[in-house]
Amino acid sequence: MASAHYTIRPGRASDATELARLHASIQLQGATGGKPHPGIAAWVEGLLTGHPTVAPEDFLVAEETATGRPVASLVGLRQNWSLAGLRLPVAQIELVGTAPEHRGNRLTERLFTALHEQYAADGVPLQIIEGIPYFYRRLGYDYALANDGAAVVPAAALPATEEKTTSPNGLTVRPATVDDAEALAAIDQRVANSTALTCPRDALQWRHEIAGRSSADLARRVVAVLAHGTDIRGYLVHSARLSATGELLVFAAACNQPADWPQAAGPMQAHLTRLGRQYQLSAEQPFTGLRPILTPDHPLIRLSPPGVPRRPRGWYVRTSDPIDLLARLQPVLRSRWHAADLRWPEPTMVIDLYGRAARLDFTDGELKAVTATRGTTSPTTDPNTHAAIPPSALLQLALGHRTFPEVLNNWPDCLPRDPLTEHFLTAAFPQVPVQIWPTN
């Protein structure tokens, strides 16, 4: 994609120095007083020169024609999430930025257009991004996933470091090593097979998280394992330093078995408390508390001391084809209807998305296929339409961000034809626990 002054092209390994310099000079400048951010530079260089799941061409670059220099770019970090055991290809968009002197030329819009075209061709149904409030709505994104909201636990409310470092049944927490990678991947796979929405890592990715990043990398996290002797029972992922406000951030926590949580929470909290106080000494900065980047219903949060409630943040999410997304969810929908002992009494169910419609075909009451069909001019009055759902509402339903009753309360233009349809869609779209620590 080109204009008179710019060309949009895939990234190259040779871009590492220029892109690191560009993003270090425009990202998080409030934290550096306008100086280049070394953590951003190290993150960009790591993504371009050694990340196990990122290739240079995952970057898109706006190159100035006259000089051949990159003046704007972004990167799509491809990953596979799991929804109730179903694989969902996702791209997390990061490092969106334009050099100040080139702003106002719609380069961000052009980069996203090229990115969306590539993902449509590659069959990547979901794109996610955190960022400027409202801005990405203009590019087809919607807040459709919560990724935060757990209370901040003040340091004074945390247990004394001498207490509960080991649970009564011998569970302890220690720093992870690369030798733990296979066990951590196995835990991720077990959690992925639950009802939650997760981002499981394989052993290669775990080794990279444990030992593959430079110490300066802004995205570097510290991994600890929950162990019983030599048996790995779970893990913790937290920040490598205190935040500017003195908080230790917690990004992920998992147990191999849900039954382990009551015994695991104490040692995990003691480990985090001890580290927070150690960071306080090394940084000569007060340790103010634990800030979990987790949802309030996470098991670790439910078993933690009470803290200061926070409003959840949201991920922007986009799908270019909500009907294709619904088709990918067929195994999950079948499983949920089976669990509710529901069988659809008609050959089809038509869900109109105010433009296009999804046709769900059933045999003996069981879902067999989801295909696209033409919508009607007036779906809310058409006798062959079972439900009319706005595309943004369907996206939130698909990811378990909203239940069907919640959508009915918040979208006046979400209209099921009858109580039976409402009952089936309520069973199809429950709220889903979110345990997402995306790969970056």
Image (cartoon, rainbow, N blue to C red):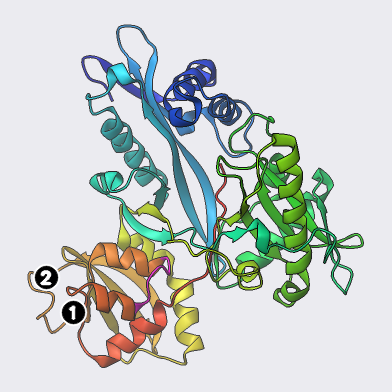
| Residue at 20 percent of width and 85 percent of height | 417
Cα distance between the residues tagged 2 and 1: 8 Å
Tag 2: Cα neighbours inside 10 Å, few (<14), some, or many (≥20)? some
Residue 79 in percent (x, y) is at 53, 48
Tag 1: Cα neighbours inside 10 Å, few (<14), some, or many (≥20)? many
What segment is highlighted magenta in the picture? 399-404
| Residue at 13 percent of width and 84 percent of height | 383
Do callouts 2 and 1 mark residues in contact (Cβ within 8 Å)?
A: yes
Q: What residue sits right under mark 1 in the picture?
A: 385
Q: Main secondary structure of the magenta part?
A: loop
| Residue at 47 percent of width and 33 percent of height | 58
Q: Nearer the viewer, residue 269 or 190?
A: 269
Q: Secondary structure at mark 2?
A: loop
Q: What residue sits right under mark 2 in the picture?
A: 376
Which part of the image, by quadrant, shows the N terminus?
top left
- Say above or below: 139 vs 356: above
Q: Nearer the viewer, residue 361 or 317?
A: 317
Task: Give the amino acid type for the residue marked by disc 1 in the picture.
Answer: Thr
